[in-house]
Amino acid sequence: MSNLHTQDQVVTSLHKEIELAHRVQHGLLPQAPPNVAGLDIGAALQSAYRVGEYGVGGDFYDFLPSRRYMLTSNDHANSLTGDMLEDNPSLNSRPVTNDAFTFIVGDICGKGLAASILMSMTRIVLRMVTLELRENTSTGVDPAIIIDHANSILYDEFSNIGVFATVFVGSYDPVTQLLVYANAGHSPAIYIQAQRGETCGYSRLLTADGTPLGVLPVSENASRRHPKNHYLHFRSGDVLLIGTDGLLGGLDQSGSSSAGYDQLLKRVETIADYPAHSIVEYMINRSDQPNDDIISDHHNNQELVESSKLNRDQMGHSNPPKDDQALVVIKNTSELLQSPHPAQKFPNLDIRAFQNK
Amino acid sequence: MDYLTSNTVTGGVSDQIKIVALSGSFDRSNADSIRQKLIQVTAKPPALVIVNLSRVDFIDSTGLATLVYGVKQARLMKGDLRLCGLKSSTRIIFELTRMDKVFEIFLTEQDAIHSFGLTEN
């Protein structure tokens, strides 16, 4: 009897610890996406490891906007105000400005409490490095440098315990509409270029070219270790989805991740016109539905969201997913800004100009 | 997940290369026991280890982390941990995460053995 009593106490205590860890983890994440001029941002996180309604895990996202491009309640959501367009010397000298809006999506290997502790540590290191670079007039918030500095801080600690973290870091300047990103072993992000005139819209995967944090030491040949910066002209109507591998897991019915991603691309192309929060809702709730007729059946945003929620309930999505899931969706909703193509300002950059499929 | 550890049987190099052959899924459920095995086979220098993944159908991030731990241990012990026999479903995970930059990966176990360049007596 006393053993049972003790077991009950242990379980109760564990529930309380998980609840506390959940509150801490979710308290540390951004409570709402920031109001950045010309962007519509949505984000969500679901943990696989849960006790009751409380879950913790190793996926995370973070947003680090600069004051320059934050909207106030008086600003029109889709336009850049006069202050934002005031002369910014760094815009003319290098592609990544100090004022660029930086966003991060990461995934610690493993699940549960241990992953959540490491997630908090990794997020803080990335945040600290980004904020330091924001003050650095020679680099700006350069994604590849953020990843490299974070790796140098975390490598020894991660090696001691045998873990790694994949991260996708992007910095976007609303004035130049140049989006710079670096991908360290993270699941491919999805870039959807909007239809423009007679040019059809299309989507592409932005795959990793660097190893995750904690895998190769600073002393390793930089070309092997480093993710490089890549450049996108991110214009009105374009969409970027950055998820973690748990989001794709349920899609892959064939045992092939490439087949899973093909399926994913087809799916997101059909929902790119919806608001960011609706795309997030849809993707999180429908991620294990390979054959999906929801989009053809529902033509407006409210129907899409409601149907996604209904699907979650029908499919038992109140149960935890098999793997942690995080998703950030960023849409460029700016009104037509007559900025020149960034290639005119930075002719030496290899700004991605994808061809239609 | 089953695993089988053996020394190579190629004459003079038989005691120098350890082969760990895995099968099934390599994930959180069995990563600890495989990690212990890798600690064991990388304990003495030079730690020359081949992990044969030809019968592995699925590997998750915890499985990858276990292999990363193993390769770091092997390199600390003046050796290396090399992989062979990856199925396409497993190989793509290495490519997407760029772990293919971390490990030397070979088609067959024999290729991996020869890559260590040991001469037989």
Image (tube, rainbow, N blue to C red):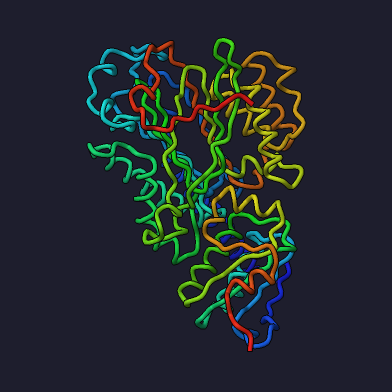
**Residue name at image x 59 percent, y 26 percent:** A279
Q: Nearer the viewer, residue A42 or A212?
A: A212
Residue A166 picture location, percent across and down: 50, 49
User: Can residue A51 be seen here?
Assistant: no
**Residue name at image x 46 percent, y 50 percent:** A119
Residue A56 picture location, percent across and down: 53, 48
In terms of image quadrants, where is residue A190?
Answer: top right
In terms of image quadrants, where is residue A252?
Answer: top right
Residue B86 picture location, percent across and down: 69, 59
Drawn side of residue B100 relative to residue B7, left or right: left
**Residue name at image x 69 percent, y 72 percent:** B110
Q: Is residue A338 above or below residue A348?
A: above
Q: Nearer the viewer, residue A319 or A144?
A: A144
Q: Quadrant of the N terminus of chain A?
A: bottom right
Drawn side of residue A337 relative to residue A281, left or right: left
Q: Is residue B25 above or below residue A80?
A: below
Q: Quadrant of the C terminus of chain A?
A: top right
Residue A307 picture location, percent across and down: 69, 23
In the rendered picture of this protein, how many numbered marks are placed on residues? Answer: 0
Q: Is residue B121 above or below residue A201?
A: below
User: Can residue A313 be seen here?
Assistant: yes
Q: Nearer the viewer, residue A81 or B46?
A: B46
Drawn side of residue A301 relative to residue A288, left or right: left
